[in-house]
Image (tube, rainbow, N blue to C red):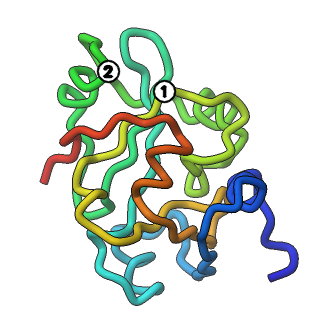
Amino acid sequence: MAGQGTPATALLTRRKITHSTHPYDVSPDAPNYGALVAAALGVPPARVFKSLVTEVDGGLTVAVVPVTGELDLKALAAAVGGKRAAMADRTVAERATGYVRGGISPLGQRKRLPTVVDASALEHPTVYVSAGRRGLQLQLTPTDLVALTGAVTAPIAAG
């Protein structure tokens, strides 16, 4: 599809990684945004993952968790050998990744940040993550997602 290129899709194309893009129309300010995105795509919400930029012991880390739950900050800190984790400031997150809130992809970020993917991703043949723009998701295998981000996997989702 023309006009759908993002740094994330460019990375996948350059690396010849099998993927597909899926546009959707959901307001980024809607309550239960992730569940609405899953419904718009017609896929189980457990296969749709959100990318959250956090600060662990003062350094930025990306957490990739299913939209069906919340991020367990203590589990995230433990997964990267840290002591304390908190959500990063929105402006800091946008500046570091090169993406806007609601469209932060774990792939193709301006600066490659340490990444933790929730272990539940490995239970699915493919998962959906932001393609780097609001209204566009990427579908790829969880093993490709982990390999391309250099992520560790750990149980970091709560709920």
Which residue is most to the front?
Answer: 16
Residue name at image x 43 percent, y 29 percent: 54
The residue closer to the viewer here, 11 or 27, is 11
- Quadrant in which the N terminus is drawn: bottom right
Q: Position of residue 52 (x, y in %)?
A: 44, 42
Q: Is residue 117 left or right of residue 83?
A: right
**Figure check: 13 above or below 81:** below
Q: Position of residue 29 (x, y in %)?
A: 50, 64
Query: Circle 2 sits on which residue?
Result: 80
**Figure check: 79 above or below 13:** above
Q: Is residue 129 left or right of residue 44?
A: right
Place residue 49 in its image quadrant: bottom left
Which residue is most to the left?
Answer: 159
Place residue 22 in its image quadrant: bottom right
- What type is the residue that disc 1 sits on? Pro
Residue name at image x 46 percent, y 67 percent: 128
Q: Is there CB contact under 8 Å for labels 2 and 1?
A: yes
- Quadrant in which the C terminus is drawn: bottom left
Find the distance from the CA under tag 2 to the CA under tag 1.
8 Å
The mark that comes first in sequence, 2 or 1, is 2
Query: Circle 1 sits on which residue?
Result: 114
